[in-house]
Amino acid sequence: MEWVLNLFSEYIENDFKKRLGNPKPTIDDLWRTFEVLFPTTTARLLVQEPVGNTVRFKALAFYHADEMGPLIEDPMRYIKEHFGGGKFKINFYCGMQFIATINFKPEGPEIWRDLPELPESHISAS
């Protein structure tokens, strides 16, 4: 879970600066805030899909915090086993607020190509 805290740290630090006027929160401050924030988050898993001379991001999965366990524990393995190879990104949100994104590029067959894209109603950041 430490990699997720590292990913969220800029968002949390900005909140400390803007809301609390604390420009230098301690690591303990960050962890305490993260422990409160994380259960309220959602994540979208997307894959980069070439389309003509450009790319688009196909939404493959949506997770509430309590559903992210295997994705958080070993993202590369989870993505490879469930979606195959490709260029993936995970976007994290708190409500409608974007927190952070991270990219993964597992090797292997592109299982995701045969999967349907999530309808917009299944990927709302709520």
Image (cartoon, grey):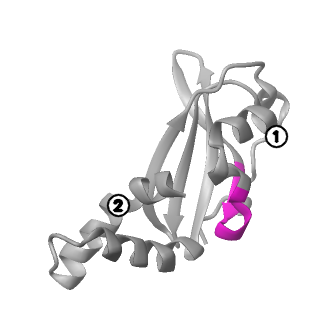
In this view, the residue in front, 56 or 43, is: 43
Residue position for label 2: 9
Q: Position of residue 34 (x, y in %)?
A: 45, 72
Indicate whether 22 appears above or below 58: below
Crowding around mark 1 (Cα neighbors within 10 Å: few <14, some 14 to 19, many 20+) is few
Q: Find residue 47 and report its horizontal and vertical position in percent.
A: 63, 35
Q: Is residue 34 above or below residue 93?
A: below
Q: Is residue 65 magenta?
A: yes
Point out residue 54 in the picture as x, y percentages from the top left corner.
51, 22
Residue that badge 1 annotates = 116
Q: Report the amino acid beneath label 2.
A: Ser
x, y percentage for residue 18? 20, 76
Residue at left offset 43%, top offset 61%: 99
Q: Secondary structure at mark 1?
A: loop
Is residue 58 in view from this perspective?
no
Which quadrant is the N terminus positioned in?
bottom right
Q: Residues within 10 Å of mark 2 (few under 14, many from 20)?
A: some
Q: Residue at x 64, y 26 (%)?
A: 106
